[in-house]
Amino acid sequence: MNLHQENRDGRCRLDIDGGMTIYEAAELKPALLKSLEASYELEVSLAGVTEMDSAGFQLLCLLKRESLERGKKLSFVEHSCVVLDVLDLFNMASFFGDPLLIPSDKLH
């Protein structure tokens, strides 16, 4: 799992590459919360997420809840097929409120 961060004018973009599973959750959680705390606007790209389980999903929920409690803007963007499958499984896409683009290979 790799986490790439870019900060600009109080805005932060995180690119997550690799797994968001129970094996990476302990490492990801403090990094995600620290990025949220340090910026007023956080954008998290999920394009590089190759594996996600319920622990990864719980991290997304935690980050969303914390952003709402702290009055911070949070958006999840560029959802990978793996992430879309998990959001669909739990029927939680509307909870996050981010636009979801369905890749063309999922339409067939």
Image (cartoon, grey):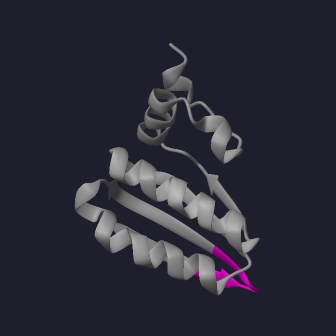
- Residue 58 position in % (x across, y down): 43, 52
- Residue 77 position in % (x across, y down): 62, 52
Would you identify the image quadrant in which residue 41 lies?
bottom right
- Residue 88 position in % (x across, y down): 51, 29
Q: Quadrant of the N terminus?
A: bottom left
**Foreground residue, 33 or 15?**
33
Reply above or below: 94 against 76.
above
Reply above or below: 105 against 52.
above
Residue at position x 32%, y 73% from top? 27
Residue at position x 49%, y 24% from top? 105
Q: Report whether residue 44 is seen.
A: no
> Which SS does the magenta portion mostly show?
strand
Q: Residue furthest top?
A: 108
- Residue 6 position in % (x across, y down): 59, 79
Whether the magenta-drawn stretch holds residue 8 is answered as: yes
Where does the magenta region start and end?
A: 6-12
Q: Is residue 106 left or right of residue 72?
A: left
Residue at position x 45%, y 28% from top? 89
Residue at position x 70%, y 63% from top? 68
Whether the magenta-drawn stretch holds residue 11 is answered as: yes
**Foreground residue, 75 or 57?**
57
